[in-house]
Image (cartoon, rainbow, N blue to C red):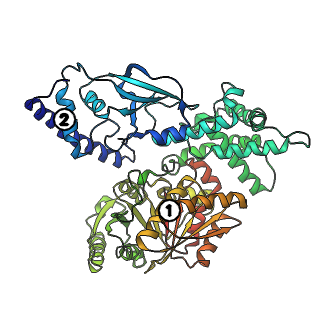
Amino acid sequence: MEEPTDGRMVAALHDFQRLRWRADLEHLLARVRGRSDDLLPFEEVRQHLRAKMAGERQLREIPLTAIVGSVGRYHDFNRSFLPRRDDDWQRWSRVMAAVDGMHGWPPIEVYQIGDVYFVIDGNHRVSVARQLGMDHIQAYVIPLQSRAPIDPSMTLEEIIIAGEYAAFLEDTRLDELRPGCDLRVTVAGQYDQLRQQIARVQQRHATPEHTPSLEEAACLWYDQVYLPVVELIRERGLLRGFPNRTETDLYLWLCAHRDELSKQLGWELSLAQAVDDLVETPGRAEQIIERVIPDSLEPASPAGTWRRNRTLDPTHWLFREVLVPVNGNPDGWQVLDQVLAWARREAVRPLGLHVVRVMRQRDSAAAQAVAREFVERCAAAGVAGECAIEAGAIDRAIRARARLVDLVAIQINHPPGPSPLARLTSGLRTILRCSVRPVLTVPRAVERIERILLAYDGSRKAEEALYLAAYLAARWQLALNIVTVLDSNAGAESVQMRVFRYLERYKIAAGYILERGEAAPAIIHAAEQTRSDLLVMGGYGHRDPLSDLVIGSTTEAVLRARRLPTIICQ
């Protein structure tokens, strides 16, 4: 490439400034929509997919739209390869200014996994090429192979699920032993349930002379347990009522439904009976689908959305803007009192929300008085607060604004009830399931927080709770205890070791508690024993809302106890 002239350099700088503005706008729109506009980090994707080298480097043209990740610069550009850093202007502009019909532009270098490419060298050339409207670019391609196919439209969460699928297939070899099998799911963490079922089949078929291998047990499970249920799902056309779900999703929900029915009736039921109950009970499926899908059956938010661009750094504030819905009742100010107490240790900005039923009430004296009192209470505590008034349904108003803040704080007056119908009609349950930010629930304000309890079971949302608990312990200098409630001691020790290693990395000391029994009572008991002032836990474990609509959740059971402020992490 020839050396750029001053005139071309100035034009390129103008292009850079225009694209920086576009990158900021795309980031804002992505945040409002609860999506990510980040490039995919190659090493994280490779580890999740267990991808391995699969051939020699080749020189060929590749589609620019299929380049969606980077090895080292995934923070410097967004998913459209727009520049994110102001200090990158000189390098980007020189690449743009030096282009003259693309003559002499050296090929970039990329890794390929499936239909997706990750830049090793040439991020700025990709960015410039996309802005010039090019479709393809020459690249040295290093291929990697994974059992799970991926494509450029996939999010990081979908790739994580694909990685879990790849690991499952690598362990069981079902894709080789049962060609054509399709065990894809749309919810992370589901393959552990399938592994547990295969392990039970392995134990059931074990004899003194022979124990089936994992591969043999997987084939027995697939042929004798899984496939008959899937054939019933196909015969009854059940999947038509659950759009955007897979047969394996519905199979796992039917397993949960069967277990709940067995518990309620005191009988051991088969999966075929669970299918019959769903189909033959008058109005069962129709009532669930028609009454729930608008709000209550929205999928739980993906784990980690709220902190996608954050690192655990005790020198930086984690929470700035806090959404605080208030109703104006005398006992309804405790949630604001809790946030103002928090503001003595964290530089938070309370953003109040008072929701009225109809539009004409927005300008009423009562509504204006609530907003005014919110601001005055904040000012008395030395904190600058604002309060908006909105008409409509309070759960929808909270969810719409949650994307614009770092934390949602809610007064707990009516936690979700224990029955499926009570869960179905609970606005709080919908907020907790679908919020893209952590939610602080406050049954009563605690003036001074000194001890926190983390409920940790190794799930992906428990990992988010671990991140937050570690931040609070380090930033606020709090005493931290971790409670684990699992079926087996071996499993609990393994889970607790993961926590220990994570906290050790940041030099955070903690106490470790192992509880047995049902999760919610065990967590509450641990909180009482440790005299904890704050509980931190993961949110709903299923992205499939039908599962926890029927079987409930530990989160709801803990909230019904209304013992202490609880942060529920997504």
Q: Quadrant of residue 12?
A: top left
Which residue is nearer to you in this view: 1 or 451? 1
Gap in Å between the C-alphas at discs 2 and 1?
45 Å
Q: Position of residue 206 (x, y in %)?
A: 86, 42
At 76% across and 33% down in the image, what residue appears?
219
Q: Within 10 Å of the Cα at label 1, are there few (<14), some (14-19), or many (20+) other Cα atoms?
A: many
495 in relation to 335, above or below? above
Note whether residue 556 is visible. Answer: yes
Judging depth in this view, the residue of 203 and 525 nearest the camera is: 203
Tag nearer the camera, 2 or 1: 2
Say which label, 2 or 1, has the lower sequence index.
2
Q: Position of residue 457 (x, y in %)?
A: 61, 59
Three-letter amino acid code of the residue under disc 1 = Ile
Q: Which residue is mark 2?
A: 93
Task: Specify the farthest residue to the right.
Answer: 208
Residue in the image at 55% along x and 52% along y: 460
Name the residue beneath numbered marker 1.
568
